[in-house]
Image (spheres, rainbow, N blue to C red):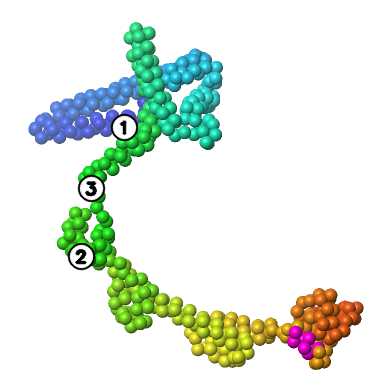
Amino acid sequence: MPFPDDQIKFAQNAADQTHSGVLKFLSSKQGKGSVAWATANTLSAVVFSAVVIVTVVLGVIFRIGSQVAALFLETLGEVRNDNASGLNSVIAAALGDLLGVEISADSIPQGGQGAANIPRMVAVGGLLHDLLGAEFGGAGTPDGVDGAKAARAFTGFNVNFSAGASIIGILGEMSSLGYFKEFREVGESVAENLGLGRLHRGALKPLVDTLVTKPYTRQLLAKYRQTRLSPDQYVHYSIAGKLDIDTLKTHLSEAGYTDADIVILQDLLAKRLDVSSMAQLERAGRQTRDASIATLGLQGYAPVDADGLLVAQQLARDSALQAAYIGEAYSLARNRHLSESEFQGVLDSITMPESEKQLWAQRLSLHLLHPGKRISIAQLAYLGERNQITDVEVEAWVEAEGYDASDAGLISLYVLGKELDFSAAEAKKAAVAAKAAATAAAKAAAAAAKANPPATG
């Protein structure tokens, strides 16, 4: 077995330090040079040999121990694989006694090495989950779940589990004549790994809280009455004149506040006017801007932010008034009581973005170019009776109103006192449509010719 170089260097370093230390010691005692060198060489050789021997011994022990441990674990694995059915019988018997149910070893897969044990794990875990699900009522419909019944079942499960673990420990030790004293650890280990104690405490907590903790808390509170109002409630009651300042300080001092902090609390917890109310007071001349800023400062606003809030309130009010003013001017202009230039003058007198002014002007132009009002059918009939309207004008009115051919005939009869020639009307419409199509085609051809002029030689 080759000796590692790093261990040789370690031994040499220890020997060199021993040699140097001995020479310095003997020189300080005025020892002779030859004797000192001989002593130092001897002791350094002893240290070097000791380090090498200890390193070799530890290495041999570790090598032998690792081989023995590996052999033991391989043997244990082989034993478990060769006796899988027996191991399943032990698992089934132990779980059956601990859980209080009948478990067959045949229902547990044989298992094996590595991933081959996963089916066994799934089967054993499934047995426990199925058992608890059936006990807690989770195997039925949602309406069948009963929390109180499930809690009682879980308590019974834990009592039965603890009794089974104790019985296994006692019977195991008795049947082995005292040689096997650790059977009780089977139940303890299973209970610890499953967390049964913690889970049972969680199951009992609602019962204890409802029947012990909460009623007892109410009784103690009713007897000793140690609950106090909050600081803001005391301050508000004092501001209302229902609590004198000394009593207020007594209550707040019981909460741990100093006299200086009590004064601060009175300012901070007093209810203040909101921004809108203070802006209205300013407009009415009942409050100055500085007073409003100071009030907002007690609510946590910096002076610049407080002033900005008040300005924003006024701007919002101005915007609402401007919108109403523009709306009234727009209504007058749309009804021809105000000219476009006069409406534009109204827009220019108001501080607003140019894009908004442009939109208002375009909106008015749209209605002026395409008026939406026409004479009524009664007025049309009145004009027809006095021969003040022609067939063409009636047809235009009917078409603009969107009536179909049948209604158009009735209106013509009602207004002009004669029936409408439907075939002539349809022919006229077709001629108008053809003319419009021809005009559009001519415009398209002219545009195409302009975009692609002919090449000149």
Please state, as top left, top right, bottom left or bottom right, where the N terminus lies in the image: top left
Q: Secondary structure at mark 1?
A: helix
Residue labelled with disc 3: 225
> Looking at this view, is 255 or 114 the one in front?
255
Q: Is residue 361 left or right of residue 246?
A: right
Confirm whether residue 389 shows in the render.
Answer: no
**150 in magenta:** no
Query: Tag 3: residue type?
Result: Arg
Q: Could you tell me if the residues under marks 3 and 2 are in contact, i.e. CB atoms within 8 Å?
A: no
Q: Could you tell me if the residues under marks 3 and 1 are in contact, i.e. CB atoms within 8 Å?
A: no
Q: Quadrant of residue 318?
A: bottom left
The image position of residue 49, as x and y in percent, is 26, 24
Residue for point 28% across, 31% down: 12
Residue labelled with disc 2: 263
> Looking at this view, is 37 or 357 the one in front?
357
- Count of number-bearing discs: 3
Q: Which mark is residue 9?
A: 1
> Looking at this view, is 121 or 401 the one in front?
401
The image position of residue 56, as x and y in percent, is 32, 23
Query: Tag 2: residue type?
Result: Val
Please state, as top left, top right, bottom left or bottom right, where the C terminus lies in the image: bottom right
> Looking at this view, is 412 or 328 the one in front?
412
Determine whether 228 is above or below 436 in the image.
Answer: above
Lower sequence index among marks 2 and 1: 1
Q: What secondary structure prevails in the magenta region?
A: helix
The image position of residue 150, as x and y in percent, is 44, 31
Real-space CA distance between mark 2 and mark 1, rounded to the nearest whole angstrom:
77 Å
Residue for point 22% across, 28% down: 44
Real-space CA distance between mark 3 and mark 2, rounded to the nearest whole angstrom:
27 Å
Magenta residues, start to end: 378-384
Residue for point 23% across, 26% down: 47
